[in-house]
Image: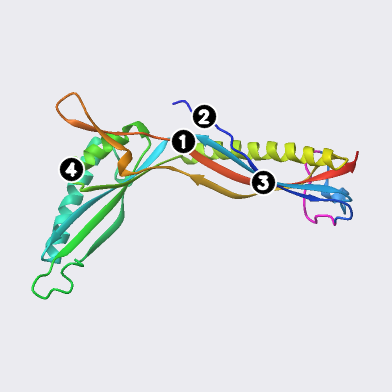
Amino acid sequence: MNRKLVTAIGVTLLVALAGCTGLAGSTGVGGVDAGDEPALERNIEVVADGEATAEPDRATIRVAVTATGDDSAAVRDELAAGDEELRAALTDWGLDEDDIKTDRYDVRESYETRDNPERTEYQGVHRYAIEIDDVDAVGEVIDVAVDAGADEVQRIAFGLSEEREREVRDAAIENAMASAEDDATVLANSSELELAGVYSVSTANAGVTPYRVSDAAMATESDGAGGAATSIETGDVSVRVSVNVVYVAEQA
């Protein structure tokens, strides 16, 4: 699968000039050692946001089996039967048991009959989080789940595996650092200063935004054999990271 990294950078800039106190405990980068500089006469501090995106390599599908009845035990029995059928169909398709997790289980009296002494109805829901590594198979897995008795497809989220997320996060950090250096250089030139190295650097506010699919984004197409197949359109997953960089500055 081809993957792409797209940069989207936002920057907040802070400048600290003459008379600034040193930053104790920081380790310098680029030839400047904080231990050799007990105090910075001049510095430029930059806070920059970096973002990178990539195509997803995993997906989580949430489906639910529902049941209604005038007896809570009957509702639980129906959910149990649905659970057995759903898991059997998904494992026969190729998923492991560990890929099919209970996300919610609830049996309660219906709101519509709660205040009606002449009629009692119970509602039950068993929701599952189904995780797959083949994002191209999402539509097929949905069809398997629905054919096995799933009554609702509630949510689909496309994300990244741990290894891929680390790679994209590294790219986001590189983008943030590049932006920080560019803007620190502009600030230095505008202040009759020049950069002499990095005094300290830290990261914060990292986050991942999966690509989520609503019901409206699902399409059903003919599979050419008289049946129907669900088609799901995917989108990129984004990873964002903030960096705080303090540069040593000298008079130009």
Q: Are marks 2 and 1 in contact (CB under 8 Å)?
A: yes
Q: Which mark is residue 148?
A: 4
Q: Which residue type does callout 3 highlight?
A: Val
Q: CA distance from mark 2 to mark 3?
A: 22 Å
Alpha carbon separation for disc pair 4 and 2 = 36 Å
* Residue at image coords 49%, 28%: 3
Image coords of residue 20 (percent x, y)? 85, 55
- Residue 24 picture location, percent across and down: 80, 56
User: What label sits on residue 4 in the rendered view?
Assistant: 2
- CA–CA distance in space, label 1 to label 4: 30 Å
Q: Position of 19 compared to 68: left or right?
A: right
Rendering quarter of residue 222: top left
Callout 4: SS: loop
- Residue 195 drawn at (x, y percent): 83, 39
Q: Residue furthest right?
A: 251
Instruction: Look at 21% across and 67% down and name the residue there.
Output: 111
Residue at 30% over, 38% down? 218
Of badges 4 and 2, nearer the viewer stands: 2
Identify the secondary structure beneath mark 3. strand
The residue that appears at 29% across and 45% down in the rendered structure is 97
Real-space Cα separation, disc 1 to disc 3, in angstroms: 23 Å
Q: Amino acid at mark 1?
A: Asp
Q: Which residue is mark 1?
A: 236
- Please determine whether, in this image, residue 181 is positioned above or below residue 39: above
Looking at the image, is mark 4 or mark 2 earlier in the sequence? Answer: 2
Q: Which residues are magenta?
A: 21-30
Where is mark 3, residue-wise? 243
